[in-house]
Amino acid sequence: MQLTDRFTVSQDVVTREVGGELVLLDLNSGQYFGLDAVGGRIWELLSNAPCNLNELCDKIESEFDAPRQRIEADLIALARQLQEQELIRAAVP
Amino acid sequence: MDWTLEAPREQAALSGDPYDCWVSPQGFCMAEFRHVGHDYLIRFPGQADFLLQPEKDTFHTSAWPSPDCDGQTVANLYHNAIEPILGNHSGGLFLHGSAVVLQQAKRSFGEGGAIAFLGLSRGGKTTLAGSFAAAGFPFLTEDVIDLRMEKDLYLLQPKRSKLRLFADSARFLLGADASFADENIKQEVVADEGLPFAETQAPLRQIYILGADHAAPISIRRLSNQDALSALLPHAFILDVTDKARLKAHFERMADLSQDIACHALDFTRDYAELPKVRDAVLKCFASLPS
């Protein structure tokens, strides 16, 4: 996975914020997933419009106190998990 | 809702894969769900087939028991599985669990209320509710949590005034000399003075989700709202996981519940001698609720 890869959220996922965190329900599988505050913000950004991971890193770096290198690594790991679960999918640039 | 008990018949092989299955903690299929045109066929292997046919705003249900399945078992399946499935499908809020009243609610519902125990099959929900009842706290239900919203309260409805327990649990409540015709099936223990039943609804105050580790020491841990939602979802009854609109609405109701009602993870060793300590721990936790 590359930072230039572009993603959009699945239309078959519903979300609900509970206790400051985000719970996702995949309507296709009936499975649910939890995202912490940063993950929830990433989901929100992806929900607003398709974007690549570099763009997401820029946003997260400006909003959270964490080094760029760590943000990139964590974001790629998260995007990989979300894609494996078919919660996000590649978007055409 | 009504249902018809049909003549027993063999469970013929069905074509195609079910769209959903309930799987026991041991990995056995407990129920299979299939679409049959606009109807739903729910098969409990070796027990009964239920056909749910849409009828105006509800369903008519027909049940065909397997030849070796008695009528009481079919009735239990209807009341403890089909009814709550249909209830959730119609926008209700039904969960798999038992419940007791810790303090008789006053008319204003300002004090006291019910607590619910959710858990996997054979996880100790009914025995725990029976233990509370034997200690003077009436049980509301042994298997189905039926919640009705009223003035921001989740009113837990009384269900049937009997507990279904395996013989060892029944003896724990009734005494060691209790005898049963068949030791290998659940015994129906009817409420009485020593095992009181709560006949009126009570506001739900807390939910306890029983842990799967039956050797764990006693512990009670408050769950975050997010963890509560994740913990609650497996204990709901869903008719059609492919019906996205209903699934979404159900998710919203469950999310509301996770935010409105305090949820706790409850672990304890499944040993009858431990139950008084479990009750004490739960009562202490209940007493700590803000009024």
Image: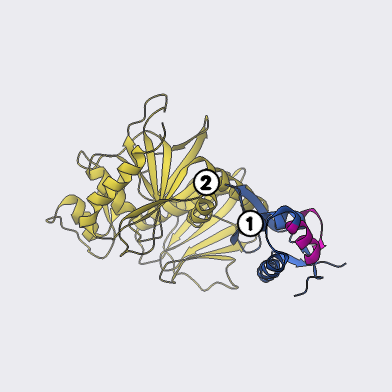
Can you give x and y, in whole percent of width and height, for residue B48 in the image? 44, 62
Q: How far across and down, in percent of the image, does residue B111 sit?
A: 38, 29
Q: To which residue does mark 2 refer?
A: B258
- B122 above or below B162? below
Drawn side of residue B9 relative to residue A76, left or right? left
**Is residue A50 a member of the stretch shown in magenta?**
yes
Q: Which residues, given as a range, are shown in magenta?
A: A47-61
Residue B108 is tagged as none
Label 2 is found on which chain of the structure?
B
- Front-most of B74 and B7? B74
- Mark 2 element type: helix
The residue nearer to you, when weighing B289 against B193, is B289
Pinpoint residue A68: horizontal percent, then vertical percent. 73, 65
**Residue B161 seen in this snapshot:** no
Q: Colour of chain A?
A: blue
Q: Quadrant of the C terminus of chain B?
A: top left
Q: Is residue A81 above or below residue B62?
A: below
Looking at the rendered structure, the kind of residue marked 2 is Ser
Indicate the quadrant where residue B7 lies.
bottom left
Report helix, strand or loop for mark 1: strand
According to the image, label 1 marks what residue?
A24
- Depth order, front residue of B119/B190: B119
Query: In this rendering, would A33 be left or right of A4?
Result: left
Residue shown at 48% from the left, 53% from the top: B82
Q: Quadrant of residue A37?
A: bottom right
The hue in which chain B appears in the rendered picture of the protein = yellow
Residue A44 can be seen, yes or no: yes
